[in-house]
Amino acid sequence: MDARKLNPESIAAQALGWIDEQTRAITPPIHVSSTYLRDTDNQYRTGRVYARADNPAFDQAEAVIAALERGPHAALFASGMAAATAVFQALAPGDHVLAPKVMYWSLRNWLMNFAAHWGLQVELIDMDQPVAVQAAIRPGKTRLVWVETPANPLWTITDIAATARIAHAAGALLAVDSTVATPLLTRPIEHGADIVMHAATKYLNGHSDLIAGVLVTARDDDFWKRVKGIRAQLGGTLGSFEAWLLLRGLRTLHLRVQRASQSAQRIAEYFAKHPLVEAILYPGLPDSPGHAVAARQMQGGFGGMLSLRVKAGADGGEAAAIATAANVELWKRATSLGGTESLIEHRASVEGAGTPAPSDLLRLSVGIEHCDDLIADLEQALLQAHR
Ligand SMILES: Cc1ncc(COP(=O)(O)O)c(C=O)c1O
């Protein structure tokens, strides 16, 4: 069956409908071999040599993710960070890179503390403003523009198509961390992106039980070969069991993302005018700065991530936010996102110095519980924190 004709729900539910030809099994076996037999004439006709470079355990998950993103190829990595850093490591020292001021903090730290020392010229800009991208890009010198949309932890929105046009006119590639949008809500390649990255740890797997990353390319070109070479040689390779678990999680991606997005929208609307809430940051709210672009770029919802700024109590906003997180019973106080269980965290405590997160901000990852229970729990926690 031609996956290009299928809707994402059908691709995901049947994991492209592959069966194991040898056994007719509908779910694949777990391939664990680290090495492959050489033919008697000294060739490797299967193309498989050693599992640091490639592994049949990756084939189906990579094919499903590539089909969902409408790209020709995907590559699994040992983590989202391994996937993202492979893109930057495929550049050459001296290359100029634009990245957002608001982005996943650990990757921002790596860019400033490692990539910059390794020779990349990294410039952090307001990526949600095309005029800022236009002003910062250096034609012939900028090799990569990195976008995250919606972006941690303020959920700012970047117009992928507009940014791709600016990047391409200057001879740069556009890479998009689409972890929060998932391929259900946004397919960056259709908007002009050259590379899509996901922390597959999050929604793609969806069960908070593995660490994984993935890249999808728009073209099988030299840059992609370099990225694959980095995986093979530096060894940021996923384990076989994790690849199998990821494939299992992918089968319900659509149901989980739809539910999380619907609940996040309801939670955002409920607390937007709440007397104990300073502000809700969520692109699904019509008065949010990124709403118009998000409404164009995201189909079927605005994702399961939002942030809530807690109104200051007697001891200020930060204390009220930390007290709110301390008083939840159903929400889990933990970092990460995209699992079936809802998570809450005081983001400035996680990110430390240099965070764009205001000190009164709680980051919420909405899971698939009943939305009424999530709202009731958060409201009682806010009330307790303001007693
Ligand atoms: C948006 C985003 N990108 C990248 C990453 C890194 O992924 P991993 O933790 O799998 O390395 C994360 C992790 O939180 C993330 O939220």
Image (cartoon, rainbow, N blue to C red):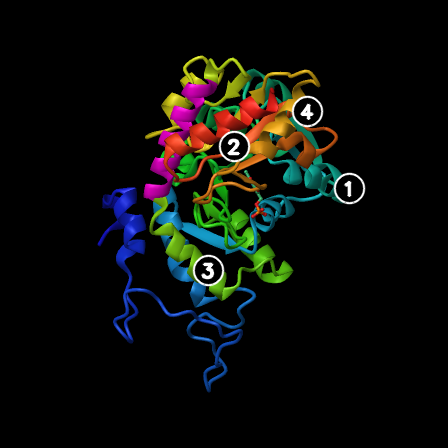
The residue carrying mark 1 is: 117
Residue 243, numbered label:
3
Q: Which amino acid does label 4 sit on?
A: Ala
Q: Distance between the residues labelled 1 and 2?
A: 34 Å
Foreground disc of the pair 1, 2: 2
Of the image marks 4 and 2, the number of the one nearer the N terminus = 4
- From the viewer's perspective, is 143 left or right of 24? right
The residue carrying mark 2 is: 364
Whether residue 165 appears in magenta in the rendering, the answer is: no
Specify whether tag 3 is near ligand 1 (CB below 8 Å): no
- From the viewer's perspective, is 372 left or right of 223? left
Q: Main secondary structure of the magenta part?
A: helix
Of the image marks 1 and 2, the number of the one nearer the N terminus = 1
Of the image marks 2 and 3, the number of the one nearer the N terminus = 3
Stretch in magenta: 254-271
Looking at this view, name the residue that lies furthest to the bottom: 40
Tag 1: Cα neighbours inside 10 Å, few (<14), some, or many (≥20)?
Answer: few
Image x and y of residue 219, in percent: 44, 45
Q: How far apart are marks 4 and 3 (CA)?
A: 41 Å
Quadrant including the N terminus: bottom left
